[in-house]
Amino acid sequence: MTECSREQDVLEAIVAARWPEDLRTHAEACPVCRDLAAVAAALHGAVEEAWEEAHPPTSGQVWWRATMRTRAEAARTAARPIMALQALSAACGIGIFAALLTRSWGAIGQLLVRIADALSAAGMQQVFIAALVIGAAVILAPFVVYFALSDD
């Protein structure tokens, strides 16, 4: 025998945890319903244990997390054009600086030679070189920090 007309009744009784006496005696006598009752009771017990052990978040926590995620996505989406404009303006600034430096390189070179001659006469050439290196570091440090800490 592989089927029984009362299988569904036995299954519903296990889920509802209410066993009428006539159904209980039938399940004890019928091999199909007895096997069904044993398996379904074990599975139902495991489900109940899992529900007791599970600690799902409250609806307020789920709502708060979804709101925070939505806000973060909106902030990232809004920041994209601003970051693109900042990158474009930085590139333009670097280009203008490079053009001005290239254009006035001869005058800068002459000025540096005059300063070096004046400092070497006074014995301060090392101080001047140190000042140039420190000045370059102070100017370039914000760019280095920005590129090191940027997300992209």
Image (cartoon, helix red, strand yellow):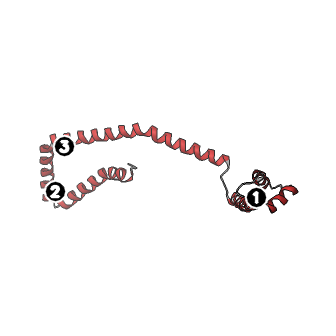
Residue under pointer 3: 101
Q: Name the residue at 34% across, 50% down.
A: 147
Q: Is residue 97 left or right of residue 103?
A: right
Q: Nearer the viewer, mark 3 or mark 2?
A: 3
Q: Is residue 80 left or right of residue 132?
A: right
Residue 107's tag is none
Of labels 1 and 3, earlier in sequence is: 1
At which x and y percent is residue 13? 80, 54
Of labels 2 and 1, earlier in sequence is: 1
* Marks 2,1: beta carbons within 8 A: no
Residue under pointer 1: 33
Residue under pointer 2: 119
Q: Nearer the viewer, residue 71 or 31?
A: 31
Q: Residue furthest front?
A: 1
* Marks 3,2: beta carbons within 8 A: no
What crowding class fits label 3: few (fewer than 14 Cα within 10 Å), some (14-19), or many (20 or more)? few
Q: As shown in the figure, which amino acid type bears the numbered disc 2?
A: Leu
